[in-house]
Image (tube, rainbow, N blue to C red):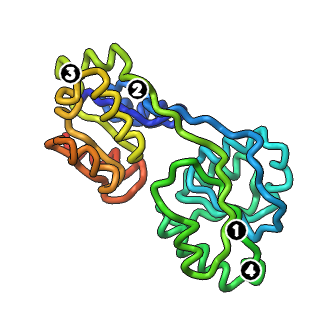
Amino acid sequence: MRLLVTRPHPEAERTAALLRAAGHTVDVAALLRIESIPAAELGSGPWSALAVTSTNALRALDEHPRRAALLGLRLFAVGRRTAAAARTAGFHDVESAGGNVEELAQRLHAWAKANPAGRDPLLYLAGEDRSGDLAGALAAAGQSVATVVVYRAVKADKIPPTVATALASGQIEGVLHFSRRSAQAYIDCARVGGMLAEALAPTHFCLSAAIAEPLAAVGAKRVLSAARPDEAALIALVTAGV
């Protein structure tokens, strides 16, 4: 099966390698570019812990002037892959708290109730655009959160020419979407190129039902959502959909 991966680099290459190992032909068109905000103002603290929902937040800390001070804090991460990236980045007290924002919020709330240090604000290192409301969920439960934007996603202007040609000729059989923002970028770039119908024709494999919504709304006929919001479940969906 010839597939298109639209997520940003470097995650796109990892996903493409997994799909190729499973026997697929894979094109990559990273329609979002991640930009770090290296000197984002973190505030004075103290903080009870850190929360991250993407490895992009960890990469944004690589050159932050206050990085060393953060390494001693406990870090709660969405999913095992982000937790592993946090350990590689130098954090020692790391907990993987589920695979989505809702599970992370539940784990953080339970920890804050059991831990007196949880009375201090939690520092959430976030992206400029967020699909879930971690701060809102915790605030509703009485937990104070300081949300700091440390990276942003910048949309591409168009689908790369070689990929556009493959879509126009019907060679791309499936497209993988890892975020609602990247799905919308795919739609927008296809419109700019005057090829929305061709871009919607393949099967669209989405990390969640929320990500699938904008594709279905503009007329994609075959849109499938993973059983869980993680890469393994999405690849399993591709295998089942072949």
User: Where, quadrant-wise, is the N terminus in this rendering?
Assistant: top left
Q: Secondary structure at mark 2?
A: loop
Left or right: 228 in relation to 39: left
N-term-proximal mark, 3 vs 2: 2
Q: Which residue is mark 2?
A: 29
- Near-viewer residue (90 or 161): 161
Determine the secondary structure under disc 1. Answer: strand
Q: Determine which quarter of the picture holds residue 75.
A: bottom right
For marks 1 and 3, give the CA distance. 48 Å
Three-letter amino acid code at disc 3?
Gln
- The residue lying at 70 percent from left, 62 percent from top is 123
| Mark 1, residue position | 122
Camera sees residue 3: yes
Q: Position of residue 185 (x, y in %)?
A: 38, 35
Q: Decide: few, some or many residues near mark 4? Use Cα within 10 Å; few <14, some 14-19, many ≥20.
A: some
Which residue corresponds to the image point at 81% horizontal and 48% vertical from the top-left? 67
User: Judging from the image, what secondary structure is the residue with disc 3 in?
Assistant: loop
Choose the circle earlier in sequence order: 3 or 4.
4
Q: Earlier in the sequence, mark 1 or mark 3?
A: 1
Specify the amino acid type for callout 4: Arg
Q: Are marks 3 and 4 in contact (CB under 8 Å)?
A: no
Q: Do the residues under discs 3 and 2 have CB atoms within 8 angstroms?
A: no
**Mark 3 neighbour density, 10 Å: few (under 14) some (14–19) many (20 or more):** some
* Image location of residue 57, percent across then percent down: 64, 47
User: Residue at position x 60%, y 44% from top?
Assistant: 56
- Count up the numbered dots: 4
Dot 1 and dot 3 residues touching (CB under 8 Å): no
Q: Does residue 99 appear anywhere in the picture?
A: no
The reply to whether callout 1 and callout 4 are in contact (CB within 8 Å) is no
Which quarter of the image is occupied by the C terminus? top left
- Decide if residue 8 is on the left or right side of residue 226: right
For badge 2, the amino acid type reads Ala
